[in-house]
Image (cartoon, rainbow, N blue to C red):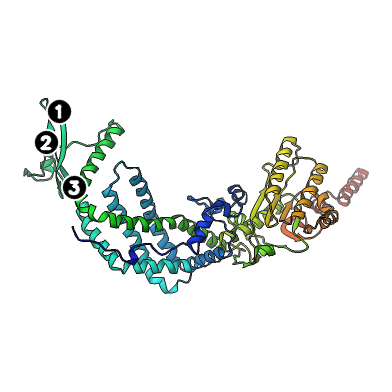
Amino acid sequence: MQETIHQNDVGTNPTFISLLYPNEESRLFHQNRTNLPNITETVCEELGLNEIFRLRGCPLSDYFTSDEAVIRYRQKTLEDVANLPELKDTLLRITPVLDDINQLRILDRDTSDKDSYLYSITQIELYVSCIETLAAGLRPIKDKITSPAFLSLCKFVFDLTESDYYKDLNAKLNALSSHVHEIKSVTIGVNLDGELRPVNAGVLSVNSDSIKSGKALDKILRLSFKNDAMTAIAPLSPVMTKGQSENREEALVGAFNSALEDVFHSSVKGWRAIVGEYVLDNSDFLLKLYPEIEFISRASDLIQKLKNHPGCSICLPEIRPAGEKRFSAHGLYNPRVALAIEDEIVTNDLVFDDKAGIYILTGPNRGGKSVITVACGAAQAFFQLGLPVPAADAVLSPVDAIFTHFPEGADDTIDKGRLGEECNRLREIFSDATPNSLILLDESLSSTGAYEATYIASEILVAFAALGVRGIFSTHLHELAAALDDLNARSAEVGGVALDTLVAGMEKGKRSFRIVRAKPDGKSYAKDITDKYGLSFDSLMSHVEEAKKKEASR
């Protein structure tokens, strides 16, 4: 095994390939979390995103972007995956191989022997297996691929597999690995001292046959009584025995590995420096794809589920610059709710414009206020992950942050301690927000009385309006919505954005889950309820008249 493998251009410095970023500069930029939009894991939890994505590797918050070029790049990647199911199947087939490479890297790094030749051989085998799987999966569909990400992957894989370097690598690997894998046993010689205690040992030979037991019964069972060099003169004993300490077991395995590596040292040493460096570089490129493959696979699964759900649409939004602060969505819905029910989802329209930078959303409990608030945040998040959004059509601008305040256990009880916590959190949000932020508040300040809550909310909303954010304040405080004209007057004085109201509708005493842009009438909800349950004054008076008639007839 003295032949030499020569690297050509294909065998060094692989072309940059990413499923999520158009170039190396972009990937490095996004690896710095300070460059990402401020959308935390807490926000992902409150919007229900972690539940529906179910990523096991990197957190979802690692993938957000405000870069229009990155968003478009990912949209094209996902479009190919949606149109070509074979792509996703191929990616899923290489995932366990990449996991093995990753685990082997860890083992190789942690081993005490810096020249772990057996690990090197296995890693090269896994690398070749991964490339062969990619080539086999991509070749039949290469003419149908349109996205820059998969076109680059195809070019790299096909150029590599057709190169002389790769062919030489395979030939060398096949010869060496077959030599390694045909090993069935080793013959060990042990020196003893005068009291027959082992002093030292060494490998005498590496064998392609297994050593057979010399026990008479074993000879009978295998119908062979021949004693040859591969037949032990006594019964075989297990190497690992029950109760043996882990340290002793590790020492024994380590000794065997060390001996085998010494045997193959001369075979591997001459080419490991060349091939090892090459495989490290190229498996690095593959390992960088590992978390990206999971993200793309999960995202495509999610999009397909939403496509197939009754009443759900998805769309690629029109992208507008951040400075335009656009959010216009028709047929908008909450993807988490959609996937949790079997019935057709109720969709709504939501538009932020010159007359509404901030909405005050009121309506009956469980009438859809929280659902539409989350739907707004989810659509923005999907967009900034580079995904189609859960709506029939949409026009969106990137935001630099999404802030949520969804107090747990919000109810009508008064809790002064929790009120302080809420106020502190709202102050933190205001301190971190910018004019390009999206603020979503759901039943904030519910821990205090209506009078106090309305006063505090008024102060907060006017301040947010002055800052120029987009946002929704979902609340049971009808007095706050009734004060809309006063809030707009105060906002105008400080050059703030306009506020408007949204109403969660009721139809004949039933929640419609329709959200309409209108001024609320708190009494209308009460009237619907009293009519539904026969508690209106007219209904009750009819009951009184009937009771009087019955009494008079007795």
Q: Amino acid at mark 2?
A: Ala
Horizontal side of residue 122 vs 418, given as left or right:
left
Q: Which mark is residue 166?
A: none
Between the residue at mark 3 and the residue at mark 1, the CA separation in whole angstroms equals: 26 Å
Foreground mark, 1 or 2? 1
Q: Does residue 502 appear left or right of residue 5 in this picture?
A: right
How far across and how far down the image is residue 215, in percent? 11, 37
Query: Which residue does the image show at 38% across and 58% down from the upper left?
Result: 94
Residue of label 3: 263
Q: Is residue 415 left or right of residue 152?
A: right
Give coordinates of residue 534: x percent, y percent.
Answer: 82, 50
**Distance (Cα) linking label 3 and label 2:** 27 Å
Q: Is residue 291 above or below residue 192?
A: below
Q: Residue at x 35, y 69 (%)?
A: 159
Task: Measuring from the top left, give residue 212's x and y in whole percent.
Answer: 13, 43
User: What is the quadrant of residue 217 in the picture?
Assistant: top left
| Amino acid found under the numbered disc labelled 1 | Arg
At horizontal 71% and vertical 43% (from top left) the residue drawn is: 410
Going from N to C along the chain, the mark reached first, 3 or 2, is 2
Mark 3 vs mark 2: in front:
3
Classify the position of the N terminus by image quarter. Answer: bottom left
Residue receiving disc 2: 234
Amino acid type of the residue that numbered disc 3 sits on in the rendered structure: Val
Label 1 belongs to which residue? 197
Give the structural element (helix, strand or loop) at label 1.
loop
Is tag 1's residue or tag 2's residue first in the polypeptide sequence?
1
Task: Report whether residue 505 is seen.
Answer: no
Cα–Cα gap, marks 1 and 2: 18 Å
* 281 or 488, nearer to the observer: 281
> Is residue 456 in view from this perspective?
yes
